[in-house]
Amino acid sequence: MDYQVELVARAFYEAEHEDFSWDGEAELVRDEFREYARNAIGLLHEDIGVLLLALQRAVAEEHPERSRAAA
């Protein structure tokens, strides 16, 4: 997860500060972008869970025999 956080933080930083270097930035600033990245990753995981649940319900409604077979 730390690797993902670092990649997303760097991408956010570079999108906002095209003329500056992530590696040359103060640790305090990098930590701020890492927090943004953690929040974004967390929200994405929540959204994926909601989407999967909605897909499962949609399949169950379209194919009730599948949900009975799984039970």
Image (tube, helix red, strand yellow):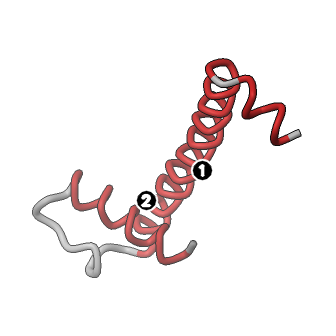
Q: How far across and down, in percent of the image, does residue 51 sit?
A: 58, 34
Report the residue marked by disc 2.
33
Q: Is residue 62 left or right of residue 20?
A: right
- The amino acid on which the numbered mark 2 sits, given as a three-letter code, is Phe
Mark 2, secondary structure of its residue: helix
CA separation, marks 2 and 1? 14 Å
Of residues 65 and 46, the one drawn nearer to the viewer in this rendering: 65
User: 40 left or right of 57?
Assistant: left
Query: Going from the N terminus, do you reach mark 2 or mark 1 first?
Result: 2
Q: In this view, does 4 lie above or below 13?
A: below
* For residue 31, side relative to residue 49 (left or right): left
Judged from this view, the residue extending furthest toward the left is: 19
The residue positioned 59% from the left and 49% from the top of the image is 45
Q: Nearer the viewer, residue 20 or 48?
A: 48
Count of picture labels: 2
Using a 10 Å C-alpha cutoff, classify the residue at mark 1 as few (fewer than 14 neighbours), some (14 to 19) or many (20 or more). few
Which quadrant is home to the C terminus? top right
Residue at left 57%, top 43%?
48
Give the percent coordinates (x, y) of residue 57: 68, 26
Q: The N terminus is located in which quarter?
A: bottom right
